[in-house]
Image: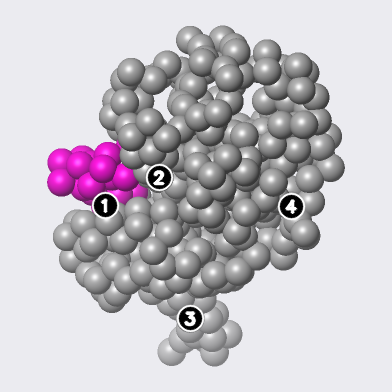
Amino acid sequence: MKHPRRTFLQFAGAAAAAPAFSRLASAQAYPTRPITVIVPFPAGGGTDNVGRIVAERMRVSLGQPVVIENVTGANGSIGTGRVARAAPDGYTVVDGIWNTHVANGALYPLQYDVLKDFEPIALIVSFPYLIVANKTIPASDLKGLITWLRANPGKATEATVGVGRAQHVGGVLLQKMTGTRFQFVPYRGAAPAMQDLLAGHVDWMLASPDYSLSHWHSGNIKVYAATTKLRLASVPDIPTADEAGLPGFYLSSWQGMWAPKGTPKSVIARLNAAVVDTLADQMVRGRLADLGLEVFPRDQQTSEALAAYQKAEVEKWWPIFKEAGIKAE
């Protein structure tokens, strides 16, 4: 006959092991139900468009529906915060961007840590920017634009899509690198900013190719350079900032996917494999290229690469936010 204490300890040990075994079995079987991808911005925007293209193809790899849910507000921090507080089981993830996982950490007093409260899954695409100006600006190239800005301190205007967004911080970086001064004119979105650029109400802006190239092709704006290390495959005629006379001026927004902190490594690996498989699909790549976006190289699609990339971006941009005194309105 077993000793009562020994029997109790056996039952206690089995009870303690049950949740761990359950989590392990669940991770091995993952996924067994639909996965929700939180897009922390409105439907129809750039982040949402990419999220839907990727989610649609991930469903094939995962064998379960992948559902987009738009949770908006506070520059993406509301939806991102919801994922930070979600169960770490792989069924709620976030399609985040430079704003949500870099800039917001410097802009807002968040209830979560952009680096510590998430498990990186994969980098997806980068959103390059073009240095563009209205066609009345006398400069014919980037060096000429910088010379013109220096000759008109405090008078020129840059259109930006809100305080603390990539275009705004990129303008601050350009001022720092060139010793120029100009005014920032914030807009609610890229479309009204471009409209005012076309009308000549503002002088220049950092614009995404998806909404600026058509105006360049029609001769309504000037394009001086791409803020990338390599020329854009979709428009190889446009020089990089390095080539055009502003070496080291790199600016891009980018999109990746994260899960809540504590999500099992096997689940992260399964999600990463689905993203990698999706980004290898030629139809997906074509749809993303049509939006002027660039898929990250295969060796940068790992969870480790996203962690390192995000950390490097925080180390690069947070001091610029601090030095310029940029805070959310």
- The residue labelled by disc 2 is 211
Which one is nearer the viewer's eye here, 199 or 324? 199
Residue 274: percent from the left, percent from the top? 26, 52
Does any portion of residue 18 appear in the rendered image? yes
Which one is nearer the viewer's eye here, 182 or 105? 182
Which element is circle 4 on? helix
Q: Earlier in the sequence, mark 2 or mark 3?
A: 3
Q: In the shown orientation, is residue 49 left or right of residue 38?
A: left
- The residue labelled by disc 4 is 107
Mark in front: 4 vs 3: 4
Mark in front: 2 vs 3: 2
Distance from the alpha carbon under mark 2 to that under mark 1: 29 Å
Q: Earlier in the sequence, mark 2 or mark 4?
A: 4
Does any portion of residue 13 appear in the rendered image? no
Category of crowding for the residue at label 2, using alpha-carbon neighbours closer than 10 angstroms: few (below 14), some (14–19), many (at least 20): some
Residue 38: percent from the left, percent from the top? 45, 67
